[in-house]
Each structure stands twice: as structure tokens, then as C-alpha cells.
Image: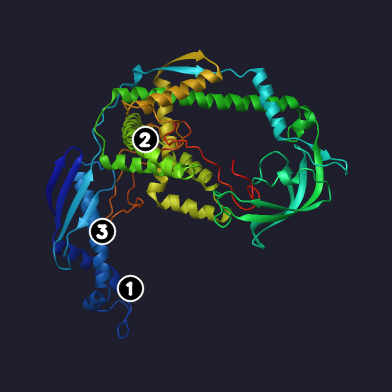
């Protein structure tokens, strides 16, 4: 194989490879010898079909297979011999005009990973902001729980429904005289004044009594999620089965038993533990951001453009999804367009941090065990229907890229925990408000850094603030087995290493605009059949 380097600029590398026709033909002959004994053809005994006939029958298929395998092997040899570490899957193209019997000429283009000096992690200093859970805060949370689990008792038969009363209703909805999907329910509960149904629905039921039958007319909002119902006028035939009034909710052992607990003390204990866990997560978020800020401030090196582009594409896709849900999608899209350069710089910061964490992890032999990986796969599979779970498991096991994306957040957490163990940490007790303010301040600082002439973007909502993309926090090379075919939009299975994407770990900050929006409702008359957007 003849190799000529065509590009050596920054992190970009380019090569021209020539594979002799004789080598390709020799491999085809070897494959023919392997399959010939299994070939069956009328007029010939098994295994006695002449090689020229076998080649005539299967030559085209064999040639394609051998060519692809030879190209793959040639790229592997190139990476090994030149000690190249591709940032992502190399772009490999077969020269135009190639045909069987000619030398195969390939062009190979890639960006390589930069040389990153592993930092001295022994000098890290961090402050841990801790919040103690107070008794009155636990009581407040229990009161909220009681409010969410109100008890209702049947009202006197003559009582007219008032705000706060619970109705038990059957309803059937029609648009233009025709029933529609999601517009029918039996035994549905509705608390008047809760705002859970579409505008006008609840208002027209004020004053009804048990046993009443009423037809009401409402108009679906213009931005209603169901296309066939947007802006449409609908009639609902409503039968009131019962009117119930709110009963007194006591925080006692009987209340705790609703949740399968033996006593109120046990419920209080669990509530406190949950609050402590929640606050610990906020503490970790603030400390992780401080850690990544230190790493980012101390390291500035060139990063592969294609990794930044891939990272930015993930961030931008989430931004566009948020903008599409806004009250004014056009205005929201215009707003994020104005900050496009800021988000690209955020993507670059994330890639740089990801590569840095990768080097730290490899230098300190941080790994994900097979047992941990199996647990990750099983946990992820639970998000799918029972009949689809095994298919998902098989997919992850067969697709290295999917496995890398699943594994990466845990690997990042492991590297971060390793750095926490190495750091000198001082504790400071603060209030919850102070901790949340510190997190918000960190967000603002990170977002303001790229832009020197305008204020930091508004609070973001897609968790891509400039922290490390999780997929880059593991593995080093991002394309150890380049395929001979183009990868297209989705990374191919041959890209066995890690690839950039917007990290979605809970510890990360936010990087999409939180444009004012209404939650998407599904169905007909309430949020399963017609709830109003809130």
C-alpha cells in the first residue's frame, strides 16, 4: 500500500492511499477458495464447481466485500503506523472511476485529537456550600404533600358545585357533530378552579348538582397540540355523577398509611431524607461547576472543529425545540439566532473540557466495569415497553456509539468524583436561597464569558452550559474503527469510540433559552383529554 500525506495543518490530516489491484484480486481468490466447497450447482458434485464459475456467480459480491474489508484494514494500518488519534470517524472516499481490476485510490481526511497535558490535580481547591434541612422546611413540604392528596366527601344532593369542589363526571366531546379521539371519559375527576381543563370548560360547570346533564360549548386554543383540534369549537355532553367537598386532611399516622408507611414519623423521616438528597444534588452542581471553571481557566488548547460542530448541532437542536414551544416561536427563534456565536463558544468550551476529563480519566485508570455497564443498559431499557426492551439491549450491545453515549455520563461522574477526592475542600453552611443564587451566578458567569458587549443570555433550559460533553469525558479516540462507507447523520457502528453530543447529566447547567411557553397537552378535553395548556 502506497501512502502520501496531503494535509498537515493544525489538527487536520489528509492522506492519499493506493491499494494495488493485485492485492485486491489475491484476497478475492482466497475468499473463493473458502466458499467453493459450499457452492452447489446443477451438474456438479458438491465442492467440485470450477473456480471460474464460482467467480462468475459470486464475483461481484465478493469483490465488494473484499474491497470494503481491505479499505477498513488499510485505514486501521494507517492510524496505527502514523500513530493517529482521530477525533471523529475519518472521511474516506474511493476515487472516481474505480472499477474491478484497477488500483483502488483512497482519500482520507480527519481531525486528530490534540495533545493534552494532564493537569496536576493535587492543587485543586474547592468550596462546598452545604444546606441543613430545618424542621419547619420539612413541615412545609408535608403540608404541600397534604395539599396534593386532599380527601373529598360527597356533598349534600342539593348543593351546587362551587370553586374547590370536586366533580365526578362523564363526558363526550364532538367537533362538527363528530366525536374525536380523547374527547370521551367516564368517571373523570375535576376540581373546579384547578385550571386543568381547556378554557371555559370548568366555568360552565359552576353551580351544577349531582345528577345534572349539561351541554357546554368551548373553543380549543389556537396553539393546542392536537392539529385536528386547534382553534376548533367543540360541544361536550357532561353528566355529573357526584359533587364532592374537600375534607380535612390531618397529618397523622392514617395519612402516612396512604403511602404504605406505618407512621407519620416514618413519613417525616423519608421526607427529610429526600430533601437532604435534593440539597446534596444542588451542592454537587455548584461544586462541579466551580471545578470545571478552574479546569477551563487553566487550559486553552485547539480542539477539533468537527467535534465542536457536532456539539453545537446538539445544542442548537434543543434550542430550536424550545423555541418552537414558545408563545411566539418566531421571536424566540430570532432571539437565539442573535446568540448563535455565544452558543458555538459554549460548544467549544464543552469539547475542550470533555477532552481534558478524558485525559485525566485515562491517566488515572478510571474505568467503567462490565457490571456497571450492564446495570446502565438494564436501567435504560426500563424506559421502553416490555416488548421493546430486549431489542434496545441488543441494539446497545451491537452499536458501539450507542454504548458510548450511555456509558459517558457515568464515566464523567467518576472522573469528577476522582477530582473531588483529590481537591482540598472547605465547607461553608449556607441557606438554600444562597446556594441557588450561587448556582445562578455560576450560570451567568459561564454564559457571559464568551460575550463581551452584551449581558449574559437569559436562564437556559437544555443543560448544555459549557460543561464537559459527557461523551467526550471517556475513551480518548473517537473513531478507532473507521468504516469505508460514509457515516451520514447518525454515527455508524464502526465509530467505536466516543462522539460529541450535548451532555444531559443532572449536574450540568443550562444552555437553551427558557422562552415563555405553554406545556404541551395531549388529547381532547383535558390533558389526557382536554386540559388547558399551563
Colour scheme employed for the rendering of this structure: rainbow
The spot of residue 231 in percent (x, y) is: 57, 53
Which of the labelled discs sits on residue 473, or is there none?
A: 2
Q: Earlier in the sequence, mark 1 or mark 3?
A: 1
How crowded is the residue under tag 2: few (<14 C-alpha within 10 Å), some, or many (20+)? Answer: many
Instruction: Name the quadrant of the N terminus.
Output: bottom left
Q: Are circles 1 and 3 on residues that touch, CB within 8 Å?
A: no
404 lies above or below 173: above
238 lies above or below 195: below
How crowded is the residue under tag 1: few (<14 C-alpha within 10 Å), some, or many (20+)? Answer: few
Identified at 78% across, 36% down, the residue is 151
Q: Residue 431's quadrant in the figure?
A: top right
Q: Residue 344's quadrant in the figure?
A: top left
The spot of residue 354 in percent (x, y) is: 34, 34
The spot of residue 378 in percent (x, y) is: 52, 45
Residue under label 3 = 69
Residue under label 1 = 38
Using the numbered discs, state the Cα–Cα distance from disc 2 to disc 1 in whole angstroms. 48 Å
- Is residue 177 something one can see in this rendering? yes
Q: Secondary structure at mark 1?
A: helix
Compared across the picture, whether 13 is left or right of 456 comes to: left
Identified at 66% across, 22% down, the residue is 138
How crowded is the residue under tag 3: few (<14 C-alpha within 10 Å), some, or many (20+)? Answer: some
Between residue 370 and residue 339, name the one nearer to us: 339
Q: Earlier in the sequence, mark 2 or mark 1?
A: 1
Between residue 353 and residue 401, name the one nearer to us: 353
Q: Secondary structure at mark 3?
A: helix
Amino acid at each position: 500500500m502506497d501512502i502520501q500525506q496531503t494535509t498537515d495543518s493544525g489538527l487536520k490530516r489528509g492522506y492519499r492511499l493506493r491499494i494495488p489491484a493485485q492485492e485486491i484480486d489475491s484476497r478475492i481468490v482466497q475468499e473463493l477458495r473458502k466458499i467453493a466447497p459450499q457452492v452447489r450447482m446443477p451438474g456438479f458434485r458438491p465442492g467440485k464447481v470450477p473456480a471460474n464459475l464460482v467467480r462468475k456467480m459470486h464475483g461481484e459480491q465478493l469483490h465488494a466485500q473484499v474491497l470494503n474489508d481491505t479499505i477498513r484494514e488499510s485505514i486501521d494500518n494507517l492510524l496505527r503506523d502514523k500513530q493517529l488519534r482521530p477525533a471523529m470517524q475519518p472521511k474516506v472516499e474511493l476515487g472516481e472511476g474505480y472499477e474491478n481490476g484497477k488500483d483502488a485510490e483512497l482519500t482520507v481526511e480527519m481531525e486528530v485529537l490534540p495533545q493534552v497535558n494532564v493537569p496536576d490535580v493535587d492543587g485543586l481547591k474547592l468550596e462546598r456550600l452545604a444546606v441543613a434541612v430545618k424542621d419547619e422546611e420539612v413541615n412545609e413540604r408535608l403540608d404541600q404533600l397534604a395539599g396534593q392528596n386532599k380527601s373529598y366527601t360527597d356533598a349534600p344532593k342539593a348543593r351546587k358545585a362551587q370553586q374547590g369542589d370536586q366533580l365526578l363526571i362523564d363526558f363526550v366531546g364532538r367537533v362538527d357533530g363528530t366525536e374525536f379521539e380523547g374527547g370521551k371519559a367516564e368517571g373523570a375527576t375535576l376540581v373546579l378552579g384547578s385550571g386543568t381543563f381547556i378554557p371555559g370548560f370548568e366555568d360552565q360547570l359552576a353551580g351544577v348538582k349531582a345528577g345534572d346533564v349539561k351541554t357546554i360549548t368551548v373553543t380549543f386554543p389556537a396553539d393546542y397540540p392536537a392539529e385536528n383540534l386547534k382553534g376548533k369549537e367543540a360541544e361536550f355532553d357532561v353528566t355529573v355523577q357526584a359533587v364532592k367537598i374537600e375534607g380535612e386532611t390531618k397529618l397523622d399516622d392514617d395519612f402516612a398509611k396512604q403511602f404504605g408507611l406505618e407512621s407519620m414519623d416514618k413519613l417525616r423521616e423519608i421526607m427529610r431524607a429526600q430533601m437532604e438528597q435534593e440539597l446534596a444534588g444542588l451542592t454537587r452542581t455548584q461544586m462541579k461547576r466551580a471545578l470545571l471553571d478552574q479546569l477551563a481557566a487553566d487550559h486553552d488548547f485547539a480542539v477539533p472543529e468537527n467535534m465542536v460542530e457536532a456539539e453545537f448541532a446538539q445544542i442548537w437542536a434543543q434550542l430550536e425545540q424550545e423555541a418552537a414551544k414558545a408563545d411566539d416561536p418566531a421571536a424566540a427563534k430570532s432571539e437565539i439566532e442573535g446568540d448563535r456565536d455565544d452558543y458555538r463558544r459554549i460548544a467549544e468550551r464543552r469539547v475542550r473540557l470533555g477532552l481534558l476529563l478524558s485525559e485525566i480519566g485515562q491517566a488515572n485508570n478510571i474505568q467503567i466495569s462490565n457490571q456497571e455497564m450492564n446495570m446502565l443498559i438494564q436501567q435504560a431499557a426500563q424506559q421502553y415497553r416490555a416488548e421493546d426492551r430486549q431489542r434496545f439491549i441488543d441494539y446497545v450491545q451491537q452499536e458501539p456509539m450507542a454504548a458510548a453515549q450511555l456509558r459517558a455520563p457515568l464515566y464523567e461522574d467518576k472522573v469528577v468524583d476522582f477530582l473531588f477526592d483529590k481537591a482540598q475542600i472547605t465547607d461553608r453552611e449556607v441557606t438554600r436561597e444562597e446556594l441557588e443564587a450561587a448556582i445562578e451566578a455560576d450560570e451567568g458567569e459561564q454564559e457571559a464569558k464568551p460575550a463581551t458587549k452584551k449581558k449574559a443570555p437569559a436562564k437556559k433550559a437544555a443543560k448544555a452550559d459549557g460543561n464537559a460533553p459527557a461523551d467526550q469525558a471517556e475513551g480518548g479516540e473517537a473513531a478507532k474503527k473507521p468504516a469505508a462507507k460514509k457515516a451520514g447523520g447518525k454515527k455508524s457502528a464502526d465509530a467505536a469510540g466516543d462522539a460529541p453530543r450535548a451532555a444531559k447529566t443532572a449536574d450540568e447547567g443550562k444552555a437553551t433559552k427558557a422562552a415563555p411557553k405553554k406545556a404541551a397537552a395531549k388529547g381532547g378535553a383535558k390533558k389526557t383529554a382536554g386540559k388547558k395548556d399551563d
